[in-house]
Image: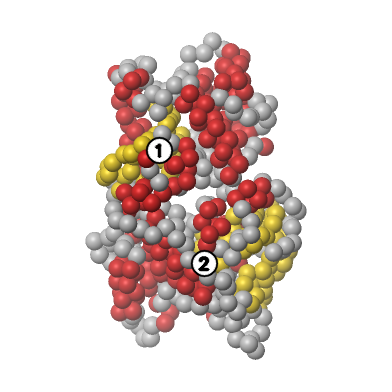
């Protein structure tokens, strides 16, 4: 295989309409890498996935002690152990330093410990490692999912430098603005099928969306002005620790109002999961309070700290929660849609027999309205694609007619058409007086959909801003600034 046949000097984007095959594409390419390596020692294809907040350089390579090494030694040692023909560890480290600062414009301190790095820096170390090993083709699968806008701009600048140096880059993403910003050519997949490719200069958001969905789609998020906004939940000084004693939320204070969509922004691992699970009674709270104010005018406020989900339900609080872990916490994978609907209604049955009629009707409605791809409502949800699993979960929780609706990455893995359907469903809930909490990773959506945005950084509130008056740069700056539990300012 020659360099001319693998698209050198080309920065291409694969834009996926989920369930398009994102989870299948990169392993398939990795298989091609192994087979090609058997035929030619000069062909190197490296798969990159976005770094996790727990430390990407620790992933399944050797001992955990690498996690405590400076980044330069870490990258050099792991590259050497992986079989890179380098003379010595010192020579490898010198090569890493050259790639870091001089050739592509990376900005990583080679003496900084990995565990002290931000997610963006850890991801940079991963890229340096595969470049040092001689990769000519780099595949980046959702590389900006955990990055701030500023960090994304830096990554794209490095990618353009790599392209200028003759590298081929494939970026797999769901974000339209990134496609148009960084690529030269765009390939579109839909339901595992190659639809076509276009030159980026000849494309726009509407044309790409139409290719991805298969028909014309309106890309507008309706955000009406909030009506009758009243406090529904008030968090005051919320502090939680995980099972290892690490502080995950630090003196978090803000108000969740009925009749509005409250967005939660932050780099992945900033406390978003712990925040929602603490409110839902699923995470132990060290200190602070979560006070619920009922919709009824004469209703008494209720303290939720110390209550589990069953206690909250028995107290008459209608709370729905779309967790980040779809199958581990949200649904039972071996059950079909109907069985998972029954998880919310089985206690309402009378006598020894369960009522399957209402759950089946709800499953049928979600199947049709959200266009869930499944052969039947009894088909196990674990055998569905991630996007369809998410449709089942979101549809079930919205159908509960909650007074509080909390969603963690509600549109993750969904095609753009269904994503906009979910956005409109959340807005409908808002206009019905529901307090909607939307944890998202796409700042453009947060700014268009939400009324206010709480920004988390390192488990602390670094700001609460008006989504109509702020911008991506301001929110991005707050995502990397720890304020020590800042109070509400919007």
Residue lying at the far top of the rendered structure: 87
- In front here: 143 or 286? 143
Classify mark 2: helix, strand or loop.
loop
In the figure, 59 relative to 176: above or below?
above
Give x and y (percent) for residue 380.
31, 60
- Residue at the front extreme, as displayed: 202
For disc 1, the marked residue is 201
Q: Where on the picture, by quarter, is residue 54?
A: top right
Q: Pointer 2 and pointer 1: residues touching (CB < 8 Å)? A: no
| Neighbourhood count class around disc 2 (C-alpha, 10 Å): few under 14, some 14–19, many 20 upward | some
Figure check: 202 above or below 78: below
Q: How busy is the neighbourhood of tag 1: few (under 14 within 10 Å), some, or many (20 plus)?
A: few
Spot occupied by residue 185 in the image (x, y as percentages of width and height): 38, 35
In what element is the residue under mark 1? helix
Q: Nearer the viewer, residue 88 or 44?
A: 44
Query: Does residue 118 appear to the left or right of 83 in the view shown?
Result: right
Give residue 114's quadrant in the image: top right
Q: Quadrant of residue 264?
A: bottom right
**Residue at 61%, 41% in the rendered image:** 150
Q: Give the residue at mark 2.
A: 223
| Above or below, comparing residue 247 to residue 302 in the picture | above
Which numbered mark, 2 or 1, is in the foreground of this view?
1
Applied colour scheme:
secondary structure
User: Is any part of residue 65 visible from this angle?
Assistant: no
């Amino acid at each position: 295989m020659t360099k001319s046949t693998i698209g050198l000097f080309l920065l291409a984007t694969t834009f996926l309409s989920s369930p398009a095959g994102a989870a299948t594409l990169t392993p398939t390419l990795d298989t091609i890498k192994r087979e090609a390596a058997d035929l030619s020692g000069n062909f190197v294809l490296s798969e990159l996935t976005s770094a996790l907040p727990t430390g990407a350089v620790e992933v399944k390579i050797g001992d955990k002690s690498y996690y405590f090494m400076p980044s330069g030694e870490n990258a050099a040692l792991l590259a050497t152990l992986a079989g890179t023909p380098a003379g010595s560890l010192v020579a490898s480290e010198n090569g890493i330093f050259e790639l870091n600062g001089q050739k592509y414009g990376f900005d990583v301190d080679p003496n900084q410990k990995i565990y002290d790095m931000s997610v963006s820096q850890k991801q940079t170390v991963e890229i340096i490692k595969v470049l040092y090993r001689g990769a000519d083709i780099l595949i980046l699968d959702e590389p900006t999912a955990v990055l701030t806008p500023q960090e994304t701009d830096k990554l794209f600048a490095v990618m353009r430098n790599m392209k200028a140096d003759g590298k081929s880059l494939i970026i797999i993403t769901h974000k339209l603005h990134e496609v148009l910003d960084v690529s030269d050519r765009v390939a579109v997949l839909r339901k595992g099928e190659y639809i076509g490719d276009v030159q980026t200069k000849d494309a726009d958001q509407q044309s790409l969306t139409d290719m991805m969905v298969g028909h014309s789609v309106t890309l507008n998020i309706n955000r009406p002005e909030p009506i009758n906004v009243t406090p529904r939940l008030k968090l005051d000084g919320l502090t939680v620790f995980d099972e290892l004693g690490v502080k995950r939320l630090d003196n978090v204070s803000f108000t969740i109002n009925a009749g509005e969509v409250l967005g939660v922004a932050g780099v992945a691992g900033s406390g978003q999961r712990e925040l929602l699970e603490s409110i839902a009674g699923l995470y132990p709270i060290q200190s602070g309070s979560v006070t619920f104010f009922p919709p009824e005018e004469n209703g008494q406020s209720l303290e939720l700290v110390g209550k589990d989900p069953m206690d909250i339900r028995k107290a008459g609080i209608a709370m729905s929660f779309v967790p980040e872990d779809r199958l581990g916490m949200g649904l039972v994978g071996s059950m079909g849609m109907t069985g998972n609907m029954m998880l919310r209604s089985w206690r309402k049955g009378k006598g020894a027999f369960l009522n399957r009629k209402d759950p089946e009707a709800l499953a049928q409605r979600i199947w049709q309205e959200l266009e869930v791809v499944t052969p039947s409502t009894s088909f196990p949800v674990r055998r569905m694609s991630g996007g369809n699993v998410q449709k089942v979960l979101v549809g079930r929780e919205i159908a509960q007619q909650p007074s509080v609706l909390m969603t963690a990455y509600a549109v993750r893995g969904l095609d753009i058409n269904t994503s906009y359907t979910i956005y409109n469903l959340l807005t409908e809930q808002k206009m019905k007086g529901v307090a909607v909490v939307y944890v998202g990773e796409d700042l453009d959506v947060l700014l268009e959909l939400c009324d206010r945005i709480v920004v988390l950084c390192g488990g602390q509130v670094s700001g609460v801003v008006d989504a109509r008056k702020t911008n991506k740069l301001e929110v991005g700056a707050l995502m990397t600034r720890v304020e020590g539990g800042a109070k509400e300012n919007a």
